[in-house]
């Protein structure tokens, strides 16, 4: 009977949820244990701070005493991590049960408190796995967002202190699409890139940012007897608007912007419901000229965004170069005022 099948499905869901909750609870207790160990080591260090290399002596001494009984989880390297854990997160109330020990280990590698706050908030909000968090950290999500937004807005949106008011607050530029597996030296067409995105849709949604869901591919629209095909259509629940993505494997032109503007106008006038916000258009292009974007579009418009894509993760030096470029631009602007 259908009712019996529903009952079984409901009970299976309850069992699965309970198991998941139990695993999370155990992992959080383990995390708290490591924090308290780190705190106790720190307190002992403070008592003997006048002794040179007392910290190294302590971790070696503790490992020799604990590892034979409790296993490799209490090696010298692990004990040093416990000590570092307390130093990076000195307030127990700041620890979040939604984060695993593996995720905290990753967060400890970050240098800035602002970075950690951002990734903690994003992980909890989006329910990222450890692997997803690692990918976002290594693809420099925080730094890429800061290149196009002010730090306060990025953190406020991440911590849900404010809703995004502008597409540029949540859309990354550049987008890093290394997971598509397309090689830089290979010749490929827009349909190849589009197909790879659909194949790796989950990863692409993660790279897009918060609140995105997939709607359609090659969406056919009719305008006075003519047919047009929109590459990709998404919906963003945070912005409450349709998001249209047009893919261009060549350098962005003003004709590309005009085409996307037509699609955006169509969705605004035909598809959008009264309670929804204006449609957003993203031109995902191999390269772009910001001046072309600026002068093709009306001033102060917020509906069209040009985002350059990269098929490989940026190196640390490339990121530093971009940050320095932005700093030089900022200093130059201040000097002109």
Image (tube, rainbow, N blue to C red):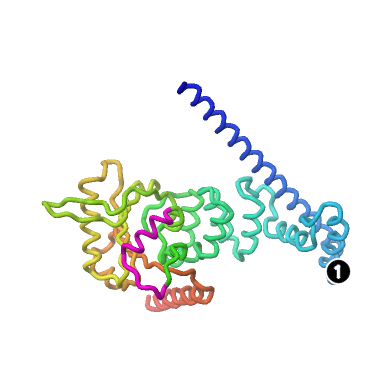
Q: Is residue 233 above or below residue 146?
A: above
Image point (36%, 55%), residue name: 166
Q: Nearer the viewer, residue 182 or 109?
A: 182
Mark 1 lies on a secondary structure that is loop
Image point (31%, 62%), residue name: 191
Where is residue 194 drawn, in percent x and y? 34, 60
Q: Main secondary structure of the magenta part?
A: helix
- In this view, the residue farthest toward the left is 224
Image point (24%, 45%), residue name: 271
52 vs 89, left or right, is right
Q: Is residue 328 above or below residue 103?
A: below
Mark 1: few, some, or many residues within 10 Å (few <14, many ≥20)?
Answer: few
Quadrant (top left, top right, bottom left, bottom right) of the C terminus: bottom left
Q: How many marks?
A: 1
Give the residues in magenta.
184-201
Where is residue 105 drawn, in percent x and y? 66, 58
Image point (60%, 61%), residue name: 113
288 vs 210, left or right, is left
101 vs 212, left or right, is right
- In this view, the residue farthest toward the front is 1
Where is residue 108 drawn, in percent x and y? 65, 61
Residue at numbered disc 1: 50
**Is residue 263 shown in magenta?**
no
**Is residue 194 shown in magenta?**
yes
Q: Quadrant of residue 67?
A: bottom right
Q: Quadrant of residue 331?
A: bottom left
Q: Is residue 239 above or below residue 57?
A: above
Where is residue 14 drawn, in percent x and y? 57, 31
């Amino acid at each position: 009977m259908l009712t019996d099948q529903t009952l079984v499905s409901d009970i299976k869901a309850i069992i699965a949820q309970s198991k998941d909750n139990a695993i999370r609870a155990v992992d959080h207790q383990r995390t708290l244990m490591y924090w308290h160990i780190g705190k106790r080591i720190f307190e002992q260090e403070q008592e003997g701070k006048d002794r040179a290399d007392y910290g190294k002596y302590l971790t070696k001494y503790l490992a020799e005493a604990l590892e034979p009984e409790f296993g490799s989880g209490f090696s010298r390297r692990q004990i040093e991590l416990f000590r570092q854990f307390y130093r990076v997160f000195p307030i127990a109330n700041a620890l979040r049960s939604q984060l695993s020990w593996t995720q905290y280990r990753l967060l400890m590698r970050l240098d800035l408190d602002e970075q950690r706050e951002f990734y903690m908030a994003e992980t909890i909000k989006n329910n990222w796995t450890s692997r997803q968090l690692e990918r976002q950290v290594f693809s420099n999500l925080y730094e890429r967002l800061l290149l196009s937004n002010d730090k306060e807005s990025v953190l406020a949106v991440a911590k849900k202190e404010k809703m995004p008011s502008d597409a540029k607050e949540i859309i990354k530029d550049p987008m890093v699409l290394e997971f598509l597996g397309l090689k830089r030296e290979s010749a490929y067409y827009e349909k190849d890139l589009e197909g790879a995105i659909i194949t790796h849709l989950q990863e692409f949604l993660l790279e897009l940012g918060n609140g995105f869901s997939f709607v359609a591919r090659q969406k056919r629209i009719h305008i006075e007897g003519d047919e047009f095909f929109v590459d990709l259509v998404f919906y963003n629940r945070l912005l409450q608007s349709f998001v249209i993505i047009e893919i261009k494997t060549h350098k962005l032109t003003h004709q590309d912007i005009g085409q996307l503007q037509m699609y955006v106008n169509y969705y605004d006038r035909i598809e959008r419901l009264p309670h929804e916000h204006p449609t957003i258009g993203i031109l995902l292009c191999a390269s772009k000229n910001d001046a072309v974007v600026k002068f093709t579009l009306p001033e102060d418009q917020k509906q069209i965004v040009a985002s350059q894509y990269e098929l490989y993760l940026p190196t640390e030096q490339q990121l530093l170069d971009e940050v320095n470029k932005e700093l030089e631009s900022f200093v130059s602007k201040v000097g002109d005022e």
